[in-house]
Image: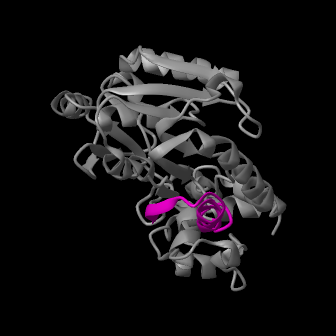
Amino acid sequence: MPVEERIIAGLFICSAEPNQVLQQIKPEWNEKVILSLHEKCKLISSEFSIAEIFLLETELSDGINYKQFVTSFLIQPDLFLRIRPGFDISVKEKLQQAGVEFNVISASGLSIANTVKIEGIVELDKEAVVQDYSSQRVGEFLPLTAKSQPLTLWDCCAASGGKSIMAKDFLGEIDLTVSDVRESILVNLKKRFAAAGMKQYTSFIADLTKPVSVVKGQTFDLILADVPCSGSGTWSRTPEQLYYFDTKKIDEYAALQKKIITTIIPHLATGGHLLYITCSVFKKENEEAIDFIKEKFHLELIKMELLKGYDKKADTMFAALLRRPL
């Protein structure tokens, strides 16, 4: 189809209710946006199938419902908040006063429309953290690592620090070390930690494809490794990543992850835990990475789960908790 027609078809198939743009350009379709996805596809073209959206079915991790996963690319994801300890009542009151509708999805989690500008309503990082539903579920693994406080934790691919803040909320007092290969993102992390009231931590820039001198000889009770990945579990938020993705990248990311794992595991204390995380749906980045860890480093698998979000207007992630034997 010509580009203009594809754009209109995309708007039609992704719309759940009538809108002014379709009314102006294709009024006969605007009246039919409430039809089922199958009916809308047939209306666009008898040859169109949603299976054409994602052509990498054989690369998927076990347990993914392919049809539901592909359909999720046509649905706008929600925005998710994780309320920090002590702020449950105030956050909900602020949302209600601002007229923001929300759904309670867990003891500390809320979902709201992605169009809501939350910054002016809630004090982010102090009262609540913007954190996807599946990312919040990674917190379910943290109590399994608990030991006498303070637990030493290295968030080795920390990005902007969301999981470190969650670890603080779930585990209490922690002796925290954070690192990332990108200096700019650690600047953002420091701002978020300040807002979150987290002052005691060590941070440094590190390329984890090679030994890290900063932590030479140091070991940690818990290494949190949210490793660089294809991001394929988040593509419903960033469809351009899906459209332009080169399948060779899967192997490139899998190789990068193995290099990072090889660098960080020597810093895992005896009896300590490794929490391996990706936002990927590809088995080479997920289950096969865990097989590599078990076979090469002889870590014990405690828990492993594909955190499905494609049926909840959320991202899909993968997490596995492993332990170095005593």
Going 39% across and 30% down the picture, which residue do you hit?
118
Q: Is residue 308 magenta?
A: no
Residue at 31% over, 40% down: 147
Q: Which residues are magenta?
A: 282-307
The quadrant of the image that shows the N terminus is: bottom right
Residue farthest to the bottom, as pictured: 46
Q: Position of residue 94 (x, y in %)?
A: 23, 28
In the rendered structure, the answer to whether residue 167 lies left or right of residue 248 reads left
Residue 42 occupies which quadrant of the picture?
A: bottom right
Instruction: List x then y, in percent, for residue 35.
Output: 47, 75
How many numbered discs sit on the rendered protein?
0
Q: Nearer the viewer, residue 178 or 100?
A: 178
In the rendered image, residue 228, in percent from the top left (x then y), is placed at 67, 45
Looking at the image, which residue sits at the far front?
A: 326
Question: Who is closer to the viewer here, 110 or 275?
Answer: 275
Q: Is residue 83 visible?
A: no
Name the image quarter holding residue 121: top left
Residue 298 falls inside the magenta stretch: yes
- Is 162 drawn above or below residue 127 in the view shown? below
Residue 116 drawn at (x, y percent): 41, 36
Using the rendered image of the protein, determine whether residue 278 is visible from the camera's viewpoint.
yes
**Is residue 98 left or right of 112 when viewed as pictured?**
left
Rendered residue at 40%/61% (across/down): 312
